[in-house]
Image: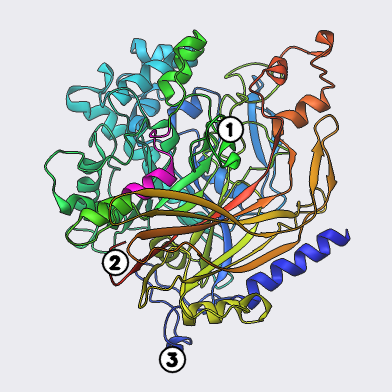
Amino acid sequence: MKRIIVAALSVCALMLCQQGYTQPIANLDTPPASNLNAKPRCKNWQAERQLLFGDLHVHTKYSLDASTQGTRTSPADAYRFAKGGRLSVQPWLPSGEALRELQLERPLDFAAVTDHAELFGERDICLDPSQRGYGSWQCRLYRGWPRGAFFLFNTKAAMAGRLGFCGEDGEYCRQAALRPWQDIQTSAEVAYDRSDDCEFTSFVAYEWTGAAENLANLHRNIIFRNASVAALPVSFIDAPSAPQLWDGLDAQCGKASALKDCEVLVIPHNSNLSDGYMFALNEEGNNDPSREAQRARLERVVEIMQHKGSSECYYDPLQSEDELCGFEQLPYGSFRSKFLGKLSPSLSEPAGPKSGFLREVLRDGLAYANSSDSGLNPLAFGFIASSDTHISAPGAVSEEEFLGHGGAGMPAGESVPPGLPDDIEFNPGGLAAVWAEENSRDAIFDALLRREVYATSGPRIALRVFAGEELPSDLCERTDFAKVGYENGVPMGGELQLNSSSAPRIAVMAAMDPGTAKWPGLPLQTLQIVKGSVDSEGQRSETVIDIASSGKPATVDINSCQTQGSGAAQLCSVWQDPDFDPEARHYYYARAVEVPRCRWSQQLCVAAAVDCSQPDTISPGYESCCRDDHRRQIQERAWSSPVWVTTQQAPSGS
């Protein structure tokens, strides 16, 4: 209990004493201008910004892959769950009663349902007897053998094609897609708290589920600022490449379109499964700088962590110096490898260092800026995380209560399948954290645009970063951490152009998640800076530096899942790069790491009394507990968005 109280006080200190604002002091009493749906300032509007947690990657029954695994819950159900309500989870009895339920102990501040746009109409037709196509063999397959339909429908969509029952040019399926898309919009509008209490924010959104020729992942979530949205989403079938998606969004939405108040953000995710295709520069081969400027405008943040693994950095146990890169890394590098690997392990190809991990991608951006006349960096991404839940459960990221996000139950049946509730390489996912003036669409969307956001692997770790030439070295001892940080530097996600050749100071403060009475949070072990750079000769470098430590070793007993030792409730440091090269381009981001804990899978293996040395203790469904690649313990963490640093010798362009 003492640890919880100390942690709670630390979080309060971090959130209140660090507050600041990037605008001149004269503007502090003026809230940010709203666009569409203007509303009074929230009661808790703070010019100095507040910390909000949410989930911007959520699937419901309208995603075909979710529906074929038995998800029946809707966008309205997902938002209700995000706000603290109970959620029914498959499997379902013939009566329609669900055999499992889930509820968040702490509601989210914001969420977005991002169902796959490509098969909205196909799913709707196959469930509505009044629609032309309902009796097609494909729809009969969908209703009779959902798993077979999962592969058929998704393979066709991944090839940017339509099923035969959609009619000429997909007319019937586009028409049928209107109903689910309207329900998604309506549910978001109903869930959005427009009162001055501002307790919850919802966004109209969807997922563009793109794939390269080898089925490498190109997926992106599309988040709208407000209720001004297109009549139908731009799907991968309509726009089968990232540049075509950007063009389609610009045509539908924005100043050059009929929807003047429409604005979107594009959030790539799972670059760890992209085989290097996600962020290919000069994708069309015409060396058009305007394309990369378009990418930089639309794609401001990237999802570094979710249900299908971490995309931070590649890990090779024989070569990687940063062992924390092994956190939630998948054993394969593409969806094709995953599914073929179920036929034979030899068909599953692991990811490689050039597969799309974000540290390398960030350095690609620095190199591009070095070679660009404008100094533009099209790959200057902020970081968020989310769940990618496929059971309508935004924010269900607890290691202790994980019910699975994909493969979460049989499409039909009268009992909960025995054993682990998800593929063992998957995880509960993470959360998006934003620093915003208030809990509203405009304030959160603006935070995403300026990249003053960060990612956590699940815990609600509080994290703040500032970089500047004039930051005082004693900033951690002051009560005005953020005020001084804003006045003398830039926050996470910002661009810092130095006036001299001296290294900037980087101030980082983190506080542990206080948790709840049922599941107390764990303390912090280490605070790190990750530095990447590209010098004037094109040489790349990467360094991970411990800048603060609890000084208190901690371990976890994987046989009992009891943590031994302790850590710190709060860590803070002001660090200056001793190896700063003023002629290079740099990024710096912070990583706050908890003490070890048992992973969700190991907790369930321990609860089931599995002893891998005693085969008779391995019950059906728990065989994966004893796999050689089973990660039994983890260290949860938070990643700040980077700060990009250049000097006058190297033009800024992030």
Label 3–label 2 contact, CB within 8 A = no
**Residue at mark 1 to residue at mark 2: CA–CA distance:** 41 Å
Mark 1 is on which residue type?
His
x and y percentages locating residue 622 in the rendered image: 73, 17
x and y percentages locating residue 646 in the rendered image: 35, 66
Q: Residue at x 47, y 86 (%)?
A: 28
* Residue 361 belongs to the span the image colors magenta: yes
x and y percentages locating residue 78 in the rendered image: 56, 44
* Residue 251 belongs to the span the image colors magenta: no
Which residue in the protein does label 2 denote?
A: 652
**Residue at mark 3 to residue at mark 1: CA–CA distance:** 47 Å
Secondary structure under the numbered disc 1 in the rendered image: loop
Q: Residue at x 72, y 20 (%)?
A: 625
x and y percentages locating residue 599 in the rendered image: 71, 35
Badge 2 local density, few (<14 within 10 Å), some, or many (20+)? many
Res. 630 mark: none
Which residue in the protein does label 1 denote?
A: 405
Residue sitting farthest toward the left: 286
Mark 2 is on which residue type?
Ser
Magenta stretch: give its range: 353-364
**Residue at mark 3 to residue at mark 2: CA–CA distance:** 28 Å
Q: Residue at x 52, y 71 (%)?
A: 438
> How is the structure coloured here?
rainbow
From the viewer's perspective, tell me whether residue 593 is left or right of residue 316: right
From the viewer's perspective, tell me whether residue 363 is left or right of residue 398: left
Res. 26 mark: 3
Rendered position, 285 above or below 480: above
